[in-house]
Image (spheres, rainbow, N blue to C red):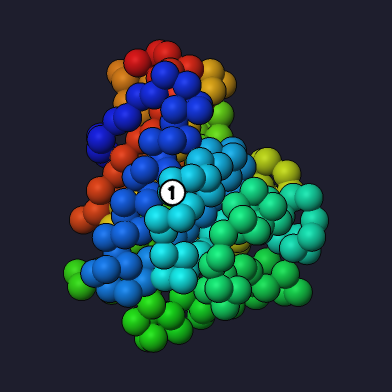
Amino acid sequence: MAGEKKILDSEEALSTSLAEYTASLSDKFAKQKGSFTVVLSGGSLIKSLRKLVEAPYVESIDWSKWHVFWVDERVVPKNHHHSNYLLAYDGFLSKVPIPCGNVYAINDALSAEAAADDYETCVKHLIHNNIISVSETSGLPKFDLMLLGMGPDGHVASLFPGHPLLKEKKKWVAFIKESPKPPPERITFTFPVINSSANIALVVAGASKAHPVHVTLGNGNGEDEVLPVQMVSPDEGKLTWFLDKDAASKL
Ligand SMILES: O=C1O[C@H](COP(=O)(O)O)[C@@H](O)[C@H](O)[C@H]1O
């Protein structure tokens, strides 16, 4: 797991550092392959993206090359206050000129099972059209950048501590109907897809998250149970932690 650790003095500084990092990857991939595939989380990650939509970053980025996905989504209408799409739209997407056709929200008219299958089919289609890269070794989708948040319990995406989905190896997109955090019905990328990414940013701020950060990057929790965040470990890609000093306070 390890990866690079950036410990910032404040959440404000974290947001600036995340903007620099994202803008630099956007430039690299847009030049290299003509597209930049970015996977968003919900939750506090969206607030931490706020500096990216401000000068100087917002003008320097070629937004037309961006293709946006969600690592997890709640099975609710897109205009529901629990929707990760709505959160991202209000806090990020509505402020930048990413073409609508490049924003891949889940189909909110479907059941959780059908929405997961539909999202997986969408990813396969975009691999076929050379928008999403594929790992030559595993055949899994290789997103250019996965922006992950983490909950105070150490969950990432909708992959919760002790849940059987942590062991899912075949499905790229899975559904959950009994999420311990509301709302209960969600879809989520699984660990094989998350860990196949070219770059993963784990973006964590606040004292409520210091314990799972310590468990993962410090001395461990001395318990047998492995937290979901400890399973974030890119196969071939690069992991970068963005921590504010409160989140890093137990390291
Ligand atoms: O439910 C979710 O929680 C996690 C963590 O949220 P945060 O507000 O504690 O950062 C989030 O990454 C995930 O996308 C979301 O669905």
Q: Residue at x 32, y 74 (%)?
A: 34
Quadrant location of the C terminus in the rendered image: top left
Within 10 Å of disc 1 (Cα), the crowding (few <14, some 14-19, many 20+) is some
Q: Residue furthest top?
A: 250
Q: Is residue 247 visible?
A: no
Residue 216 seen: yes
What is the total number of numbered labels drawn onto the structure image?
1
| Quadrant of the snapshot with the N terminus | top left
| Above or below 71: residue 233 | above
Q: Position of residue 74 (x, y in %)?
A: 68, 56
* Residue occupying image coordinates x 54% and y 67%: 98
Q: Position of residue 244 (x, y in %)?
A: 44, 24
Q: Label 1, on which residue?
A: 57
Task: Give the residue displayed 51% in from the left and 80% down from the top.
Answer: 121
Say left or right for 184 vs 229.
Answer: right
Q: Residue at x 48, y 45 (%)?
A: 55
**CB at disc 1 and ligand 1 closer than 8 Å:** no
Q: Position of residue 239 (x, y in %)?
A: 29, 44
Considering depth in this image, is 93 or 184 the residue closer to the camera? Answer: 93
Q: Is disc 1 placed on a helix, strand or loop?
A: helix
Q: Quadrant of residue 32?
A: bottom left
Residue 37, horizontal then vertical, whole percent: 41, 65
Residue type pointed to by label 1: Tyr
Q: Is residue 23 above or below residue 137?
A: above
Seen from the viewer's position, the closer of residues 30 and 222 is 30
> Residue 55, relative to residue 89: is it above or below?
above
